Image (cartoon, rainbow, N blue to C red):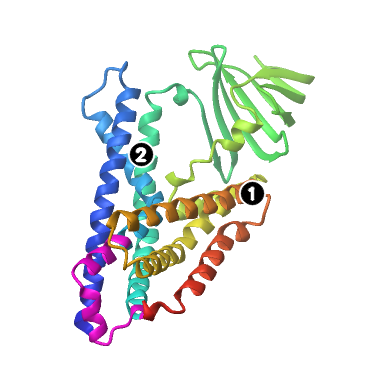
Amino acid sequence: MTTYIKFIIITFLKSFLNIFLVMFSLVLILNLLSELDFFKEINVNTYLPLYLALLNSISHIFEMLPFIFLISTQFFFINFFKNNELDIFKYSGLKNINIINILSLTTFLMGILFIALFYNFSSSLKNIYLELKSSYTSDDKYLAVITNNGLWIKDKIDGKTLIINSNKIENNFLVETFISEFDDNFKNIRNIQSDKVNIQNNEWIIKNAKVYEENISSEIKNLKIKSNFNFERIQTLFSNLSSLSILELLDLKKNYELLGYSTVKVDVHLHKLSSYPIYFILIVIFSSIIMFNSKNFKSTGFKIIIGLFSSVVIYYVNNFFYVLGNTERIAIIVAIWLPLLILSFINMLMIRDINDK
């Protein structure tokens, strides 16, 4: 029996690795084409687009893991059916449910490793990619980060550089804000201090601004300054959470809370990551059940089409709930875990007579 278990695990891992490499190759080619198009009018080293495509592909392939697990399970069973190995297992006392259990446990351990190791690796590469790519765009003129000292913004507009620090964000306002203006030579022009800054639009309205300019201080009730940032843009600045490791996400959440910034997107992302090992198991069980129920169909293409169609449906259902969670229309726990509960229920209904297949 132990020999059969080892054989099943090794065969499944080989199937997964093959599909993983195929999907990674496809993603790499698509990313490479995108990078070549981006750099077509920029004189850069020949290998830079390939390097950037490689960095970005690691992160993309992580997002495709549910799909890879589903297709890997399909090909695992296709090979079993082709070689009549399933019948050998049955004669040896290994039932269909036992095979599913072995695959589920293997998948769960793989899921833990992917979250603990591969995700943190892919996020670090994604961060390198974003930093390197930004050096070839105008985005390097603008910067916004959240630390335990509040929100920091670097903005460049109308020949001036603005360095902005704010302790808190409330609705469309920056609270307790200090702004330093510099000219092209980075000489300080003036400093502005205010308890409340309206950032709803790209023309900020600084309430009761205290202005310090050449040793002269003054107070302006409604001072207006232009900025490349507004409340909506600041909200979406930190949306690329895939470039942050799990520890960095937890730190970001803490800083968001200190700043008064919504942690919903970070919470959704963290819940999504924590759900992945369970999600992978459910995908593998679902795919296994489909393959057992369709083993009498001789067409391999038909089985693959069923798997592809199923994966697309599952993806869009998950994405629908994910969007609802990000927009706070439903609770985060519901957004992430309800689709998995639905898939679990479907699996329970379909698996009852699996040993008879």
Q: Label for residue 258? A: 1
Q: Secondary structure at mark 1?
A: helix
Which residue is depicted at the point 29% across and 47% down? 23
In this picture, which residue range is highlighted in magenta? Answer: 74-97
Asked if residue 255 shows in the view, the reply is no
Which residue is depicted at the point 25% across and 75% down? 86
Along the line of sight, the residue nearer the viewer: 76 or 82: 82
Q: Label 2 belongs to which residue?
A: 128
Q: CA distance from mark 1 to mark 2?
A: 27 Å
Which residue is depicted at the point 53% across and 16% down? 187
Residue 285 magenta-drawn? Answer: no
Crowding at mark 2 (Cα within 10 Å: few <14, some 14-19, many 20+): some
Instruction: Judge from the rendering whether residue 103 lies leftward or rightward of residue 140; answer left or right.
Output: left
> Which SS type dominates the magenta stretch?
helix
Which corner quadrant of the image does residue 74 belong to? bottom left
Is 28 placed above or below 76 here? above
Amino acid of disc 2: Ile
